[in-house]
Image: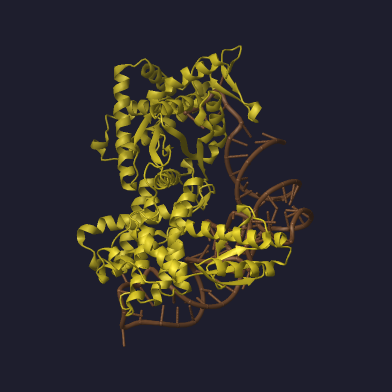
Chain colours: A yellow, B brown
Amino acid sequence: MLQLENQLTEAVSSACNSLYGSRPSDTQISIQSTRSEFQGDRTVVVFPFARLAGKSPEETGKEIGAYLVKQEKIIVDFQVVKGFLNLSISDEYWAHALNQAILQKNFGRKTPGSKSQIMVEYSSPNTNKPLHLGHLRNIFLGYSVAEILKAAGHDVVKVQIINDRGIHICKSMIAWKLFGNGETPSSTGEKGDKLVGRYYVSFDKQFKAEVKALMSSGTDKDTAEAQAPILLAARDLLHKWEAEDPEVRALWSMMNGWVYDGFDYTYGEMGVDFDKLYYESNTYLTGKSQVEAGLASGAFKQRDDNSIWVDLSDVGLDEKLLLRKDGTSVYMTQDIGTAILRFKDYPALDRQVYTVGNEQEYHFKVLFEILAKLGLEQASRCHHLSYGMVELPEGKMKSREGTVVDADDIMAEMKTTAEQLARDAGKLENIPEEDRDSLYKNVGYGALKYFLLRVDPKKSMMFDPKASIDFIGNTGPYIQFNYVRARSVLRNAGIDDIASLTPLSPVHLDDVERALLMAALSLPSVIEEAAKSYDPSLVANLCYDITKSYSRWYQDHPIIKEEDEAIRNIRLALCYLCSNAVKTGMSLLGVSMPERM
RNA sequence: GGCCCCGUAGUUCAAUGGAUAGAAUAGGACUUUCCUAAAGUUUAGAUGCAGGUUCGAUUCCUGCCGGGGCUACCA
């Protein structure tokens, strides 16, 4: 497809050169798909050349059009409407393009590892809180961008940083010690992350009660909050943890293990994975030494109270604290350490991509500037994959108001809904018993992933648990359904090897067929674009476009029953190409395609 | 206060500065002796307001109105 655009750009350029004696710049040559209400396949916007020609846009368009039809074999006709030159591309070209595309093993994907190595960080949840709807967008987005970068030829390393240490962990630990009675996930049958999350909440409850009690006996609020016994106990645990007290470390390992087991289950259901996990407990110290090194090199400054700061006013940002006056680290300290550690672990790494919500945009601007100040050449290529919040009809999710949509719950609900719908529609007869469970997951989770990924990541989006997730219309299941029908056609036609249809003889394609073919052929360039802009919604929208066109075409273009062999072969090839392109596209969104549904 | 993002049909989302702003859903009217109707056809419906740049602005610039975020020796 890209070849066609390039070919046309070049042709228009030489047309201008030979007609008007000067070439327009490539940016002035705009080639786009012709709108369906006009005749033609590709449209050249002629306004920029009118000045060059010293003639009206219409006249210029006609001259260029006539020239192109004469010179270029693939351009068979043209029409000028206002300032737009619509070109008709030959049937031979389309047959050839289709032929080539179906013979490509991994149509849409570039050779693995042909481009630079990129690390993508995503998920990185707080280990005290079970995953919720917001994490879902993060996880699906990060995974998808990683897959898209891979398909675009990059070598990708998927990672997350696990926030496994600090006062917050000690809070759930102390609460479990005080109120847990030795409970474990296996004794209660509860998912590990849910169990630990529950004790984090118990801590908060107890803490508030203690603060209230202290205040009612005359202590002021600040003192009460600083002296609540349970908080002091948590602090004590933190000190013991840092001193590597074996008992505390054992409890810490055990409870973190529960959380990881819980998360692992959820990641497994989601179908996402990581190549390497970074634990803050292993990286938090390296940040300090990096900051000290930066101080020595003059990149950072120390104040009289011994705290260390970076001054970013030269790049329009503020001063930022890097180490407290007592020498302890802040969030930024750890991020600096982790970033540098990762570049050391992966010497070929070209850049890092951080999938983190847009409320941390400032943080990452600062981080990248700091990395640059520390002399990291890759800093300018690092990217904060910032995404908008997922909002509920009631507004933001608030744990206090119990409006948090739990990730496991919503996924289970999607699966149940998929099962229910399949049953109601009487679809289960053709599905073997043992395939049903994975079908419900494919369809239910596919709907959820597609829903969250079809929106531009930058924008905040609305999620209505009751009404949002549909299985009809512009949805994952709609795309899956049409894929299934296409696969069914190919099965019924007995096509084992698509190459047996080639070489395809050119036949005339009608408007519907051309629209379909062009959509499918654009997969490689859309993946390229999505990789450049870190935007899975482009891929999602293309999958929908192809499917929409396919479904319309399928309605009134017989494939197997078509008697003319040349036409039949072209249609089978189209059917194959579309199903293949959509399967590839959806796989980049983390959505599996069933063979029957 | 300063900085950043967002305002498109009733609703949820599209539109590298290009033609008559596309879909989906909800509403109206239709289509199944035909490769899976979770489908298709059709009808109706939108660029917050005011300027500017341009042959051309949903898109770029300015102001206003409305919504969100950031602005911690928190993570």
Q: Position of residue A109 (x, y in %)?
A: 39, 51
Please state which of residues A250 and A121 is positioned toward the viewer in this rendering: A121
Please state which of residues A11 and A473 is positioned toward the viewer in this rendering: A11
Is any part of residue A277 visible from this angle? yes
Q: Residue at x 32, y 21 (%)?
A: A249
In this rendering, is residue A15 above or below A303?
below
Q: Which residue is drawn at 51% across and 37% down?
A: A383
| Numbered disc total | 0
Q: In the shown orientation, is residue A392 left or right of residue A82?
A: left
Q: Position of residue A501 (x, y in %)?
A: 30, 68
Q: Position of residue A592 (x, y in %)?
A: 33, 54
Q: Position of residue A488 (x, y in %)?
A: 29, 68
Is any part of residue A219 visible from this angle? no
Q: In the shown orientation, is residue A268 left or right of residue A43?
A: left
Q: Quadrant of the C terminus of chain A?
A: bottom left
Q: In the shown orientation, is residue B53 left or right of residue A544?
A: right
Please state which of residues A35 and A537 is positioned toward the viewer in this rendering: A35
Q: Residue at x 50, y 16 (%)?
A: A293
